[in-house]
Amino acid sequence: MEINTAGNPAQETGEYLTKQITNAPGAVLCLLSGGSALSAIEHIQLDEQTKRRTIFMMGDERWSREESENNYLQLKQLYPDFVTAHTVVDTSVQESESQDNFAARIHSTIEVTLSEHPNIFVISLVGIGEDGHTNGIFPMDKELFRETYPTDTNYTSVITSGLSLNFRASVTPTWIANNVDEIVLYAVGENKKTVLKSLIYETKELYEMPAQLIKLHPNATVFTDQEIAV
């Protein structure tokens, strides 16, 4: 896991994603994240040829029809030109679509994408929460974690507690481990320093700290504005 302390982490993250996507030899699936990680999006600058072979999609989603909550709708509101200029999977919630039906639809979208592009390069931009969650994967009791994030699907609905929006959906930890070629963690702000130190120096089970997925991944890069000795 490579740690980059950046003066302008949003710009440097976006430029890094640009480089990795451009250098990929064929089709690319770039999974995006909501929250503060959205600030890196405006710094992704692809040429027209690279745009045509790149698919963007939210790796995790807030199951809501509200523009202020759904990650895709926030992306569309904040960076409409980006959505217009690129191939971006619509992960807004359709009218009368249940949370499970939503997850099933995105599961199918991922399946079709991987089937049509068997050698696709998958890069995932993720954030990290102070509780150690990442990409819609939250710490839970061991058995509940196993039930919530099954190993036989790529995308699942998630119900949490204690958040402003408890209804989520996410690619699963198993799918990330088996299919994501590179993880890019965007962790900015003083409030991320403690959890980053924990991620780097402590070893925990995934159900205790899902962000361990990042440390366990063979190709992970961190962009932060916090000085953390490694």
Image (spheres, rainbow, N blue to C red):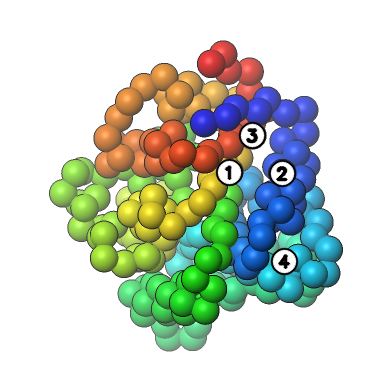
Which of the two labelled residues, at mark 3 and mark 1, occupies the earlier sequence position? 1
* Mark 4 residue element: helix
User: Residue under circle 1?
Assistant: 184
Instruction: Determine the CA span between mark 3 and mark 2.
Output: 10 Å
Residue 220 in view, yes or no: yes
The answer to whether mark 3 and mark 2 are in CB contact below 8 A is yes
- Mark 4, other Cα within 10 Å: few <14 / some 14–19 / many ≥20: few
Of the numbered discs 3 and 2, the one sitting upstream in the chain is 2
Q: Amino acid at mark 1?
A: Val
Amino acid type of disc 3? Phe
Determine contact: label 4, label 3, CB under 8 Å.
no
Q: CA distance from mark 4 to mark 3?
A: 25 Å
Q: Are marks 1 and 2 in contact (CB under 8 Å)?
A: yes
Task: Between label 4 and label 3, give the one nearer the viewer.
Answer: 3
Q: Which residue lies under the disc numbered 2?
A: 16
Q: Is residue 166 above or below residue 220?
A: below
- Left or right: residue 77 compared with residue 143: right
Disc number at residue 77? 4
At label 4, the amino acid type is Gln
* In contact (CB < 8 Å): disc 3 and disc 1: yes
Mark 2 burial class by Cα count in 10 Å: few <14, some 14-19, many 20+: some
* SS at circle 2: helix
Q: Residue 155 sits in which quadrant?
A: bottom left
Quarter of the image for residue 51 reads bottom right
Q: Does residue 189 appear in this view?
A: no
Question: Residue 223 got which mark?
Answer: 3
